[in-house]
Image (cartoon, grey):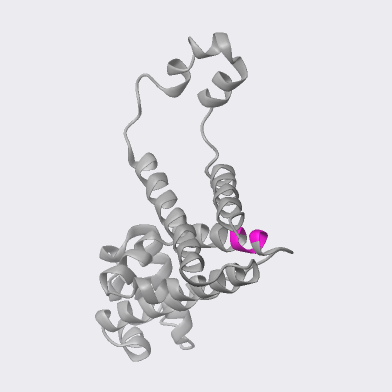
Amino acid sequence: MPRTALTREEVLEAAASLVKQHGPGALTMRKLAAELGTAVTSIYWHVGNRESLLDALVERTVQEMGAIRPAGRTPAQRIVSVARRLRRELRERPHLIAMVHERGLTERMFLPAQQALVHEVHAAGLRGARAAEAVRAVQFQVVGFVLVERNRERSPVQSPGEQELWDAPTAEHDPALARALARPADPEKLFTASARALVSALLGRV
C-alpha cells in the first residue's frame, strides 16, 4: 500500500542517496518511488519530472556545500579546517558534484568556501592579489588532492607494489623511511600535513 505522508525533502534525500551510490543514470522515478514505498505520481507531485528532480538535487548540493564553517583558534587553523571539510564534502558526493559541474554551477558551489577563506586570510593580514593567491592555492590544493585520490583508487593493482619497490636499497640507508613508504598512504593524514604546510608558507610571507 503506498504511503500517504511524504515530503519534498524526503524525496530529495532518497534521490541523493541513489545518486551517491550508483550515479545519476540509476535514478529513475520508478526506482525512487520503490525506494520510498510510494506511487510514482506522488514523486511527480513533489518534485516534478526527472529533469526537475535533477535540478533540485544540484541546487541542494550547492546549498550543502555552502554550509562549510571554519573551526580553530587561529586563521591558519581555520583555513586548514575549511580545506579539510571541503575535501570531505567533495569525496562524499562525487556524482552530485559532477552534476553541479555539468550545469555550470561549480564556481557558485565553491563561492561560500572561498568567502570563508577570504575572511581568514584577511584576518592573517593578507590583502589584494596575495590574498586572492592564497585562497586559490588552498582551493586548488583541495581539488587536486581529491582528483589524485580518485585516480589512485581507480588504478589497477600495481605489480610490483610499493612494499617490493622500497625493500632496497633505501632500506639500507633509512629503514624507517622504507617501512613507511611500503605502507599504504593515509590520505586524511597526508592531506592535513600538506594543507598545513601550504597555509604556513602562504601566511608566513605576511
Judge whether residue 61 can be spotted in this image.
no
Q: Residue at x 52, y 58 (%)?
A: 88
Q: Is residue 62 magenta?
A: no
Location of residue 144 with respect to 170 vertically, above or below = below
Q: Position of residue 121 (x, y in %)?
A: 58, 67
Q: Is residue 79 magenta?
A: yes
Q: Hey, which quadrant is residue 60 in on the image?
A: bottom left
Location of residue 181 with respect to 173 vertically, above or below = below
Q: Quadrant of the C terminus?
A: bottom right
Q: Which residue is at the far bottom?
A: 45
Q: Position of residue 23 (x, y in %)?
A: 32, 61
Q: Position of residue 36 (x, y in %)?
A: 42, 75
Judge whether residue 195 can be spotted in this image.
yes
Per the picture, the main secondary structure of the magenta-coloured stretch is helix
How many numbered discs, if any? 0
Residue 16 appears left or right of 125 = left
Residue 29 appears left or right of 152 = left
Q: Residue at x 55, y 51 (%)?
A: 195
Q: Quadrant of the N terminus?
A: bottom left
* Span of residues in magenta: 76-80
Q: Residue at x 47, y 86 (%)?
A: 7
Residue 94 appears left or right of 127 = left
Location of residue 64 with respect to 174 vertically, above or below = below
Q: Position of residue 90 (x, y in %)?
A: 45, 60
Q: Hey, which quadrant is residue 93 in on the image?
A: bottom left
Q: Residue at x 67, y 66 (%)?
A: 71
Q: Which residue is at the far right?
A: 73
Report the front residue among 172 and 42: 172
